[in-house]
Image (tube, rainbow, N blue to C red):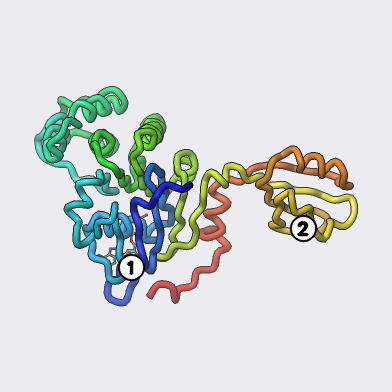
Amino acid sequence: MDAPALIATENLSKAYGGFFALRDLSLNVRQGEVFGLLGPNGSGKTTTIRLLLGLLRPSEGRATVVGFDCWRQSLQVRRLVSYLPGELRMTGSMSGLGVLKYLSGLREDESLDRAVAIAEQVMKLNLRRSVRKYSTGMKQKLALAQAFADPVDILILDEPTSALDPSARADVLTLIREARGQGQTVIFSGHVLSEIEAVCDRVAILRLGRLVHVEDMHARRRLRMLLIRFAGDPPATFPEELELTVREPQGAAVLLEHRGPLGPLLRWLATVDVEDVAIGTEDLHSLYNQYHGPDVVVNEDALS
Ligand SMILES: Nc1ncnc2c1ncn2[C@@H]1O[C@H](COP(=O)(O)OP(=O)(O)OP(=O)(O)O)[C@@H](O)[C@H]1O
């Protein structure tokens, strides 16, 4: 059985004048899920996150976290959530350690040791240096160390790897997996499809402030793409028990989606007159391009 929804939105909308930054978002995020938010610049990801944190007031609809209304009970919500903003501002003469001490003091808990361990051992940061002298990526690492050390139920990470080098990006994905292993729920917005693909359980795709698709990544990992070139005309139908869906007929060749077990498929293939078969997978890029690829025609009416 699916875990219960921890975060829920119902027709959540945010308008600025007549312009909808987010419109009619209804979704549930379950406890222990890593949930990805995908979409091009300006599609509504940060607006969604800020509505969940109670930093923005919804124009319509509502969002709840563990039953608390994100706007009216934002204090209760923020106690349960650690948030990594997309744009970090860290100035002043405090050292990295000073910043961690200050932030963990705000939580009044024992997260400091863990934050220092992540910052020094995983992120390889020098915590004695002043944050003013940190590079953009170093600041992001410090904020990540604090976010992952927080003993909260929910982590909301807005583009957490945007300024990081490849090895630090991989470390963040490991930390996200560890967070899920500890039962934390993670919302992860980003643009790097391979990262989203690597860690997310489900992914929401936004376009012009609207939710256009939710993908179950576990089901997607079981998806096989099959290109069969038949010796004669392709069959009009395929055996139902094989769970094949025709994606695209291409003359004598047919592109099919397959989600079932491999054995019955191979046995069936041995019985039909085929000239050639190619079996592959499909990455998240192909799905993303169905909504945001170069051939997609955007309906500007959706903007207001
Ligand atoms: N205060 C504001 N006033 C007017 N429009 C706004 C305001 N804040 C955001 N928007 C608009 O809302 C839309 C959604 O913005 P949002 O920041 O949620 O996008 P995003 O998906 O997070 O983009 P990015 O990938 O660039 O971070 C954009 O068109 C943006 O210009």
Which mark lies nearer to you, 2 or 1?
1
Name the spot of residue 25 as percent of width and height, x first.
39, 64
| Location of residue 18 in the rendering, given as x and y in whole percent from the top left corner | 31, 77
Q: Is residue 246 left or right of residue 24?
A: right
Which residue of the protein is positioned furthest toward the front in this rendering? Answer: 1
> Is any atom of residue 165 visible in this view?
no
- Can residue 89 be spotted in the picture? yes
Residue 92: quarter of image? top left
Task: State whether residue 272 is above or below residue 176.
Answer: below
Q: Secondary structure at mark 1?
A: strand
* Numbered label attached to residue 250: 2
Q: Give the quarter of the image for residue 184.
A: top left
Q: Amino acid at mark 1?
A: Ser
Amino acid carrying label 2: it is Gln
Query: Dot 2: within a 10 Å radius of its alpha carbon, few (fewer than 14), some, or many (20 or more) residues?
Result: few
Q: Residue at x 90, y 54 (%)?
A: 232
Q: Is mark 1 within 8 Å of ligand 1?
A: no
Q: Earlier in the sequence, mark 2 or mark 1?
A: 1
Q: Is residue 171 left or right of residue 64?
A: right
Q: Name the residue carrying label 1.
A: 13
